[in-house]
Image (cartoon, rainbow, N blue to C red):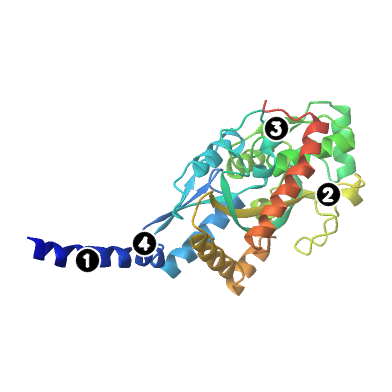
Amino acid sequence: MKLLNRLFVPALLAAAALTGPARAETYPARPIKIIVPYTPGGFNDTLARTVGAKLQEKWGQPVTVDNRPGGGTVIGTDAAAKAPPDGYTLFVTPFAFAVNQSIFKKLPYDPEKDFAPITLAATTPNLLVVSPSLGVNSVKELIALARSKPGGISYASTGIGSSNHLSMEKFKQMAGVDITHIPYKGSGPAVTDMLGGQLGLMFDNIPNVIQHVKSGKLKALAVTSPTRSPHVPDLPTVAEAGVPGYEVDVWFGFAAPAGTPQPIIDKLHAEIVRILKTPEVKEKFAAQGVDVVGSTPQQFAAHLKDQSAKWAKVVRDAGVTPE
């Protein structure tokens, strides 16, 4: 028995020594999930599915998208924060991620401590779009209509703290108008009701509405960027169309739960950025009005801090509440 132990125990130790590094080197060894805190249909979802399909193709492991809408993105964000930090749960980090701590008195997660930034993936302006039934053809006409009917027209958003919500709240504040907010759980259902004439207007990411603008089903009045967008060069900015000083840029990123091993973060970062910067993906996104970024994790962390500070003031000045 002693002889067997002398032979068997060293063999076990040698196997264990090989197994640890082997496991790290073989990531990913099982399916990966990407949580999107919105319904299917918007660009956050498109980003997850595009990158997920390419990761699956490269690594040979299934990559699924888990849509967790609701709560102004808090439901999906909380699910991502509480996932095991093993690299098998990723999170499409939306604009609202940097805003919610200014709106909600208490969040079930800490946006700084519970997440490991991977990359700032892409940016796009919002478009101010109206239903043709609203009967306005410019920003100045919209402002005049809203002032004549305080609270009488409604706008859609993808939830409290979303870019389209705060784009409109900033617009209302700067233009001196009262427009009623109708929150949705994602761009898809909001745009559907816009097309059906149930709502008058909304700000939304270019890729979510550009095809409906081109088909004439929605009318675009302006773009939220500080200068005209090359993706819609004929559209004026909101600032030049009647609200001087107005600008909003929208962004999308990737993060993982805090504590995810650094080698895994590094591997995810390298592969996601490689995917984003392929000509195929850049051209696909550009056709939808989206510009690829692909920052470092450190740059994305700095961006999140900057956005949190910027929008905290807008939230405070506009009196935005969780409703």
Instruction: Name the residue tied to disc 2.
Output: 247
Depth check, mark 2 against mark 3: the one in front is 3
The residue that appears at 78% across and 64% down in the rendered structure is 230
Task: Residue 203: tell me if it is visible.
Answer: yes
Secondary structure beneath dot 4 equals loop
Is there CB contact under 8 Å for labels 2 and 3?
A: no
Q: Secondary structure at mark 1?
A: helix
> Which numbered disc, 3 or 4, marks the residue that appears first in the sequence?
4
- Neighbor class of circle 3 (other Cα within 10 Å; few <14, some 14-19, many 20+) is many
Q: CA distance from mark 4 to mark 1?
A: 27 Å
The amino acid type, in three-letter code, at marker 2 is: Glu
Q: Marks 4 and 1: CB-CB under 8 Å?
A: no
Q: Nearer the viewer, residue 80 or 265?
A: 265
> What is the C-alpha distance between the residues marked 2 and 1?
66 Å
User: Which residue does the numbered mark 4 point to in the structure image?
Assistant: 29
Q: Are marks 3 and 1 in contact (CB under 8 Å)?
A: no
Amino acid carrying label 1: it is Pro
Foreground mark, 3 or 1, reads 1
Q: Residue at x 56, y 55 (%)?
A: 46
Q: Residue furthest bottom?
A: 279
Q: Which residue is mark 1?
A: 10
Nearer to us: label 3 or label 4: 4
Q: In the rendered structure, which amino acid carries the disc numbered 3?
A: Ile
Front residue of this view, candidates 149 and 70: 70
Q: Earlier in the sequence, mark 2 or mark 4?
A: 4
The residue under label 3 is: 103
